Image (tube, rainbow, N blue to C red):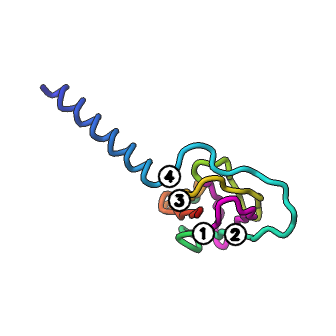
Amino acid sequence: MGKRIITVFAAVMLSLALAACSSEDVSGSAAERVEAAGDEREVLIQGGNFYFDSEEYHVSVDEAVKIIYQDIEGAHGIHIANTNIRLRNNESVVVKFREPGRYKITCSLYCGVGHTSMTAYLVVE
Ligand SMILES: [Cu+2]
């Protein structure tokens, strides 16, 4: 009896977790690196203790953008979900997003008690 309840509970938790993921993120590798032409629009993301300077950053599908990360307080970094984009202080990358979506940005460097609360979204539309 107890075992069966645990199995049902685990199944419910798993389906909730999957539902939460699919509503926030898109699957697959969403961004491709492109050669910098020098005139890309710059998207500056800044991080402090323990926040990013905006809740959302906006880019257009197929727009070449230069994503730049800077620390304004403490030492942090960013990882953008569904991409291999990981940046530390003063690093940048020129990319195009192929798919619209809300891509979660998290701190990529363990920075202390507020680390897990450092989230924002890159909105591609
Ligand atoms: Cu952190």
Label 3 CA crowd tier, 10 Å (few <14, some 14–19, many 20+): many
Is residue 60 shown in magenta?
Answer: yes
Spatial CA span between label 2 and label 4: 20 Å
Is residue 90 shown in magenta?
Answer: no
Amino acid type, label 4: Asp
Mark 3 near mark 4, Cβ–Cβ under 8 Å?
yes
User: Which residue is pictured at 53% across the width and 64% down the height?
Assistant: 120
Amino acid type, label 1: Tyr
Marks 2 and 3: which is nearer the front?
Answer: 3
Mark 1 near mark 2, Cβ–Cβ under 8 Å?
yes
Label 4 CA crowd tier, 10 Å (few <14, some 14–19, many 20+): some
Label 1 CA crowd tier, 10 Å (few <14, some 14–19, many 20+): some
Q: Which comes before the other along the chain, label 1 or label 2?
A: 2
Spatial CA span between label 3 and label 1: 10 Å
Q: In this view, does 13 lie to the left or right of 18?
A: left
Q: What element carries label 1?
A: strand
Spatial CA span between label 3 and label 4: 6 Å
User: Which residue is pictured at 79% across the width and 67% down the height?
Assistant: 40
Residue range in magenta is 57-80
Amino acid type, label 3: Arg
Q: Which comes before the other along the chain, label 3 or label 1?
A: 1
> Looking at the rendered structure, which numbered label has been put on residue 43?
2
Instruction: Give the residue number, with chain letter if any, for mark 3.
Output: 102
Amino acid type, label 2: Val
Q: Position of residue 106 (x, y in %)?
A: 56, 57
